[in-house]
Amino acid sequence: MIASAPLAERPLLIDGRAVRGAGEPRPSIDPASERAWTVVPDATPAQVDDAVAAARTALNGEWRRALPRERGRLLRRLADLIEADRDRLVAAEIRDNGKTVREVTAQYSLIPEFYRYFAELADKLDGRVFPPERPGILNYTLVEPVGVVGAITPWNSPGLQLAFKAAPALAAGNTLVVKPSEQTPVATLEQAALFAQAGFPSGVVNVVTGAGDVGAALAGHPGIDLVVFTGSDLTGRKVGAAAGSALSASVLELGGKSAQLVFADADLEQAVVGVAAGICSASGQTCIAGSRAYVESSIYPEFSERLAQRIGELRLGAPDDWSTEIGPLAFAAHRDRVEGFCETASAEGAEVLVGGRRPERTGFFFQPTVIAGVTNATTLMREEVFGPVLGLTTFEDEEEAVQLANDSRFALGAGAWTTDLARAHRLTQALDAGTVYVNNYRLASFQTPLAGFKDSGVGFENGQDSLAHFTRRKAVWIDFSGRQKDPAST
């Protein structure tokens, strides 16, 4: 028997150089085959120091002298490179986290547009000139980059999440140290390699990989000016506390337990398709997944039957197969966690209408699931599962529907299915969520803010206004009168 060749270890990216991780390297497991397919590096806190130092040097060097329109030109070139290399990047992310080729290809079609959108804003960051307080005084503000940005990204959509953070940060003139999830770092390393090809100076973008100790070293680093994080609310609290201890600013996009409300006047087929997609897209591994469904009691029997049938018919399969609708979950421990939520729901008296278990096949698959007989006190309806598991129950009227939807510590997204236009407008105001969808779910755009309220986050990503997080404003007073004044008179 011929021994297989050893897997190559991926490098870190520090100051424009491929650097071997000084920690213990780990195999990366393909979620569909359960086999190691590459080896990922582990950085050490000392290498985090090196990356932050490289980013600081770049910030104060060639990158600071780059004109805004030059930053925009580099971002557009990067977008072109990602577009040209899409198939390879998609393949790497599929092997990394098991998401379907449908989902990942759609994301990589969108990623270049994030960079192009913010490229167009790079030379639109202007300050204000204030009316003179007295003759001979010019008073204005300068808009400057906030500095070195530490970006900590999650495992579910690493390529897209890198764009969420890198595009506005670079457009504003910052430098970056990126720490992707230890579960799925390859997609980030592959995309980051294109920054040098696009012409960004060494040290502008750095990537360090590893587990919690690496993230902690970055979040609390005294050389970081802004931490942007996407992940669970539990980890987000730690990241925010570490950043606060270092007096760094932070933007935290955290978890969700989003409600979908289905009213009796809704287009029933549209609602069935939308609710199913809202929880099953990306195998439910998305913060804005519509994981709580509340259905008006008069249509509940028909709706629940049709929904369970549709979700039960979704095709599980290899993530690189275009006919696959549900891929595996990203890693074994997460699959076990999702399964545990279903077992807990059954123990608490809920009823599994469809799914609820792992199929008998290789890979970290879990059946898409609908669980009825739940209340807002059920664990399934309180905690983020981050898998294809929907809790389903009823409401009697609009007032109760809103009360049930808002009864959560999370407030990231909410959806409503209704043909009543007046109700739709009432709901957009009444629902406590950063994003409200009506007769659609889980849409996103580079120009639209993504924000969470309550335990779902602090600050927001995307859209023109997000650049405020990545900039600082400096007040300037210039006396051009030529007359020296008594300081006591100011």
Image (cartoon, rainbow, N blue to C red):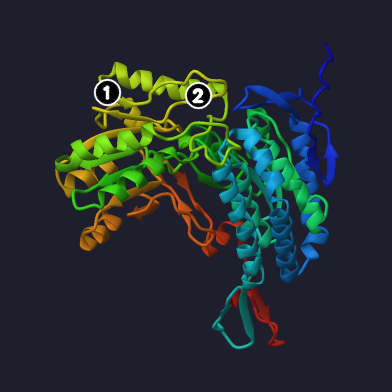
Q: Amino acid at mark 1?
A: Glu
Where is 87 relative to 315, above or below?
below
Count of marks placed on residues: 2
Residue 408 in view here: no
Q: Residue at x 63, y 52 (%)?
A: 163
At x 60% / y 58%, what residue is drawn?
A: 114
Q: Residue at x 42, y 35 (%)?
A: 314
Other-residue count near label 1 (Cα within 10 Å), few / some / many at <14 / 14–19 / ≥20: some
Q: Are marks 2 and 1 in contact (CB under 8 Å)?
A: no
Which quadrant of the rendered structure holds the C terminus? Answer: bottom right
Q: Please give the residue where the numbered disc 1 appears in the rendered image.
A: 351
**Relative to 255, does residue 31 appear above or below in the rendering?**
above
Q: Front-most of 52 and 388?
A: 388
| Observer-nearest of 387 and 238 | 387
Q: Callout 2: helix, strand or loop?
A: helix
Looking at the image, which is closer to me, 369 or 220? 369
* Residue 338 percent coordinates (x, y): 45, 25
Name the amino acid type tagged 2: Arg
Which quarter shows the N terminus? top right
Q: Image point 33% across, 49% down: which residue?
A: 415
Q: Using the rendered image of the protein, determine whether residue 479 is visible from the camera's viewpoint.
A: yes
Q: Looking at this view, name the residue that lies furthest to the top.
A: 1
Classify residue 486 by image quadrant: bottom right
Real-space CA distance between mark 2 and mark 1, rounded to the nearest whole angstrom? 20 Å
Tell me where residue 278 appears, x and y as whole percent: 40, 43
Say left or right for 431 vs 190.
left
Which residue carries the number 2 mark? Answer: 335
